[in-house]
Amino acid sequence: MAALVWPVRPGEHVRPERVRSERVETAGAGREGAAPMRSRVAAALLSFGALGALWAGASALRAMSREPVVPPAGARRVGGGYLYVVRPGDTVWSIATSMSPGADPRPLVDEIDAEVPGGVLRVGEVLRLP
């Protein structure tokens, strides 16, 4: 903070060119970097908060857009999914499309493929479906 210092005695005439500006030290002097640092920290916190809000919003939208899972006929509900016995004519694709009609079955096909040993469905095989 700068202040004007009068280098004359009271009552003496002062010419404008004799007035000089000097820095007056105040409490907390030497902390010039504190305010910019606080603003950087505040900007970083706001950025992280905005990213967190975007992430939460995207997760909520993704959860809302999921089609409800319809278990295939003959599937039994177990903790965290279904047990399904493979029937003649079943394919991984047909099982996936019957579980989520109207939705993209590819993610579910990948999950079922991971459960199928050797990649081949066998009649009577028990699959654990999500």
Image: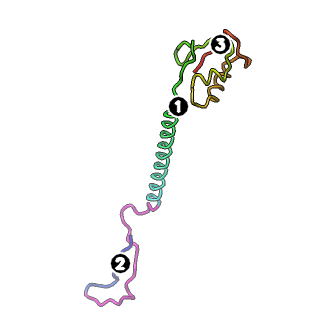
CB atoms of marks 2 and 3 within 8 Å: no
Q: Which of 7/121 is in front?
A: 121
Q: According to the image, label 1 marks what residue?
A: 66
Q: Is residue 20 left or right of residue 86?
A: left
Q: According to the image, label 2 marks what residue?
A: 4
Q: Earlier in the sequence, mark 1 or mark 3?
A: 1
Question: Residue at horizontal 67%, vertical 17%?
Answer: 90
Question: Residue at horizontal 36%, vertical 62%?
Answer: 27
Neighbourhood count class around disc 2 (C-alpha, 10 Å): few under 14, some 14–19, many 20 upward? few
Q: For marks 1 and 3, give the CA distance.
A: 25 Å
Q: Which of 33/66 is in front?
A: 66
Disc 3 residue type (three-letter): Val
Neighbourhood count class around disc 3 (C-alpha, 10 Å): few under 14, some 14–19, many 20 upward? some
Q: Nearer the viewer, mark 2 or mark 3?
A: 3
Q: Position of residue 26 (x, y in %)?
A: 36, 66
Range shown magenta: 11-32
On screen, 64 above or below 26? Answer: above
Q: Earlier in the sequence, mark 1 or mark 2?
A: 2
Q: Which of 32/107 is in front?
A: 107
On screen, 2 above or below 71? Answer: below
| Residue 23 included in the magenta stretch of the image | yes
Q: According to the image, label 3 marks what residue?
A: 86
Question: Residue at horizontal 62%, vertical 26%?
Answer: 108
Q: Nearer the viewer, mark 1 or mark 2?
A: 1
Q: Please, what secondary structure does the residue beneath circle 1 have?
A: loop
Q: For marks 2 and 3, give the CA distance.
A: 92 Å
